[in-house]
């Protein structure tokens, strides 16, 4: 297929231009004034049938999508029914913003048990259905029978892996879709192959080819030979660079729109990043050293899965505290620092505390209660009550007495927490894109703060220091492809994990 023919997939609509759209905004019932860059984004979404909306976190991707619904309803030139697939934690947020910003018929929320959901599908009265990725997988046959031609996939990086069932399902549904919008601030999380999965979800297989063809044409791949303890061998592929970048950028350009705060000229709170190096308590040092030696022995005997799946996490967990690895006694230099920070900020500023582990959340909550402090909320991934999550978010945003929000990855995407100024990262994320997403919860348009501060807590002599250095020096694939100043890092290899394990141990450095 020629590239010129491939561009026909985008199907530009020529019946409306930017100047006409600006004049129509007051007519199509959207209740929120749009910035100039949002108007241009709306025009792009209207003209493009299959697009990736990759604006930076905080630039209002949801607003632009809702404005698209209002515009299509006003023009009445095509079927304006939609399936919105979003992370479960933000279903209610989408519903609230739908009602706040549009005059459209309220969407149907596909939540509750299967019987309730089936009832919604059988009624066939909704013009828009909002559901989670999990519900889409469970109910996909019923969803397909609705005959709805348009799909929105929010936080589309969730299906960046080709081999997942969700990715396969979405690619199947896309074949019959009229419009598809993938909304994600991170089209590439770690590897350029993530992008190929999203492009397949848009139905662009004929443009970019198969994964193997894409990999061979655009990726520089390094193969490493591994020998297992039982004598078996295998080769592992790792993308270490790019090829034919100019061609890839030219092919991508019609199918995505990406703006940063620098591009749109909007003021954002200044971001200050501070790394705090802490020395482990002696109890933590002893456990960390035992784990380190155990993992080195496991590697030497060929137990690579032990190093990657169990041991690596246990070495990170002990940095958070002894309770996180299962001990009853609470010893943690990091949580001591968090507790002291909260004491210093009581009555002054709102603080977000992020940790990767639910047990660490419980330890922090126990410490806050021991302080006699009640002005806090916490969110973890096993909180399935969406209304309770929304209550927690609204209390943190609007209640002056609620100053602390503690959470795991559940606070990393979808939540708008711009009332906070400080973010304490107890456990470092292994991907800088995820760090950007986390900071983007509080660093957003409309924030009243002049600056926000990210505190990264690192323990001396542990693998955390090596991981943080890793985030700084790896190649920036996303910057090369999209021409934006940003960094995306590949995943750690087994050998690199071992290097981090062997290199730790100097707790007094």
Image (cartoon, rainbow, N blue to C red):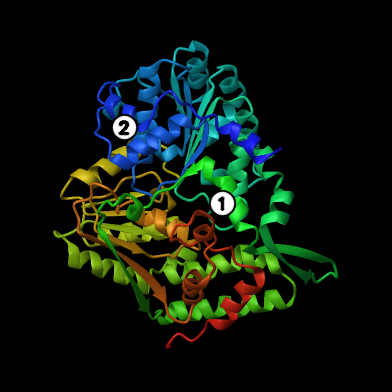
Q: Is residue 77 above or below residue 164?
A: above
In the depicted view, which residue is nearer to us: 168 or 349?
Answer: 168
Judging by the rendered image, the residue that carries numbered circle 2 is 97
In the depicted view, which residue is nearer to us: 101 or 342?
Answer: 101
On the question of residue 41 being in view, the answer is: yes
**Relative horizontal placement of residue 365, taking residue 180 as reference (left or right):** left
**Relative horizontal placement of residue 117, taking residue 334 as reference (left or right):** right
Percent x, y of residue 39: 33, 36
Outermost right residue: 231
Indicate the quadrant containing the N terminus: top left, top right, bottom left or bottom right.
top right
- Which secondary structure lies at badge 1? helix
Percent x, y of residue 393: 29, 43
Label tally: 2
Location of residue 322 (image quadrant): bottom left
Q: Is residue 29 above or below residue 331?
A: above
Q: In the rendered structure, which disc, 2 or 1, sits on the residue that comes first in sequence?
A: 2
Q: Dot 2: few (<14), some (14–19), or many (≥20) neighbours within 10 Å?
A: few
Q: Residue at x 77, y 70 (%)?
A: 226
**Relative horizontal placement of residue 26, taking residue 488 as reference (left or right):** left
Judging by the rendered image, the residue that carries numbered circle 1 is 249
Q: Residue at x 50, y 54 (%)?
A: 482
**Relative horizontal placement of residue 84, taking residue 250 as reference (left or right):** left
Q: Is residue 142 above or below residue 372?
A: above
- Which secondary structure lies at badge 2? helix
Percent x, y of residue 362: 38, 56
Which is in the foreground here, disc 2 or disc 1?
A: 1
Q: Residue at x 66, y 56 (%)?
A: 218
On the question of residue 62 being in view, the answer is: no
- Label 2 vs label 1: CA separation? 34 Å
Percent x, y of residue 215: 70, 54
């Amino acid at each position: 297929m020629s590239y010129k023919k491939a561009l026909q997939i985008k199907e530009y609509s020529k019946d409306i231009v930017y100047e006409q759209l600006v004049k129509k905004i007051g007519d199509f019932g959207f209740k929120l004034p749009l910035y100039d860059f949002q108007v241009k984004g709306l025009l792009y979404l209207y003209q493009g049938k299959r697009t990736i909306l990759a604006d930076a976190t905080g630039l209002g991707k949801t607003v632009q999508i809702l404005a698209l619904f209002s515009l299509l309803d006003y023009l009445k030139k095509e079927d304006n029914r939609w399936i919105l697939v979003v992370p479960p934690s933000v279903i209610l947020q989408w519903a609230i913003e739908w009602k706040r910003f549009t005059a459209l018929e309220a969407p149907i929320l596909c939540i509750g048990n299967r019987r309730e959901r089936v009832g919604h599908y059988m009624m066939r009265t909704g013009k828009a259905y909002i559901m989670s990725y999990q519900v889409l997988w469970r109910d996909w046959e019923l969803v397909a029978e609705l005959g709805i031609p348009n799909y929105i996939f929010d936080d589309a990086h969730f299906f960046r892996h080709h081999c997942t069932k969700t990715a396969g399902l979405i690619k199947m549904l896309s074949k019959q879709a009229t419009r598809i919008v993938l909304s994600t601030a991170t089209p590439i999380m770690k590897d350029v192959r993530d992008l190929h999965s999203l492009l397949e979800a848009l139905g662009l297989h004929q443009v970019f080819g198969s994964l193997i063809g894409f990999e061979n044409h655009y990726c520089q791949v390094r193969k490493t030979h591994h020998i297992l303890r039982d004598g078996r061998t295998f080769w592992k592929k790792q993308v270490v660079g790019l090829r034919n970048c100019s061609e890839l950028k030219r092919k991508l350009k019609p199918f995505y729109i990406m703006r940063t705060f620098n591009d749109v000229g909007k003021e954002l709170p200044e971001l200050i990043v501070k790394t705090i190096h802490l020395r482990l308590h002696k109890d933590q040092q002893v456990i960390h050293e035992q784990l380190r030696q155990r993992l080195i022995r496991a590697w030497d005997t060929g137990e690579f899965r032990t190093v990657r799946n169990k041991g690596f996490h246990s070495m990170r967990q002990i940095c958070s505290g002894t309770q996180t690895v299962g001990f009853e006694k609470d010893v943690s230099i990091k949580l001591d620092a968090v507790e002291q920070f909260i004491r210093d900020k009581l009555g002054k500023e709102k603080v977000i505390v992020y940790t990767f582990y639910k047990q660490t959340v419980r330890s922090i909550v126990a410490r806050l209660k021991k302080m006699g402090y009640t002005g806090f909320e916490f969110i973890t991934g096993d909180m399935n009550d969406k209304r309770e999550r929304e209550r927690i978010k609204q209390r943190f945003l609007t209640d002056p007495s609620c100053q602390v929000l503690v959470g795991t990855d559940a606070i990393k995407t979808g939540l708008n927490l711009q009332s906070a100024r400080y973010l304490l990262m107890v456990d470092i994320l292994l991907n800088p894109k995820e760090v950007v997403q986390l900071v983007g919860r509080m660093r957003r348009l409309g924030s009243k703060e002049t600056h926000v501060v990210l505190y990264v807590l690192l323990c001396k002599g542990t693998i955390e220091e090596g991981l943080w250095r890793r985030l700084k020096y790896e190649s920036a694939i996303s910057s090369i492809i999209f021409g934006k100043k940003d960094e995306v890092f590949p995943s750690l290899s087994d050998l690199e994990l071992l290097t981090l394990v062997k290199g730790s141990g100097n707790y007094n450095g």
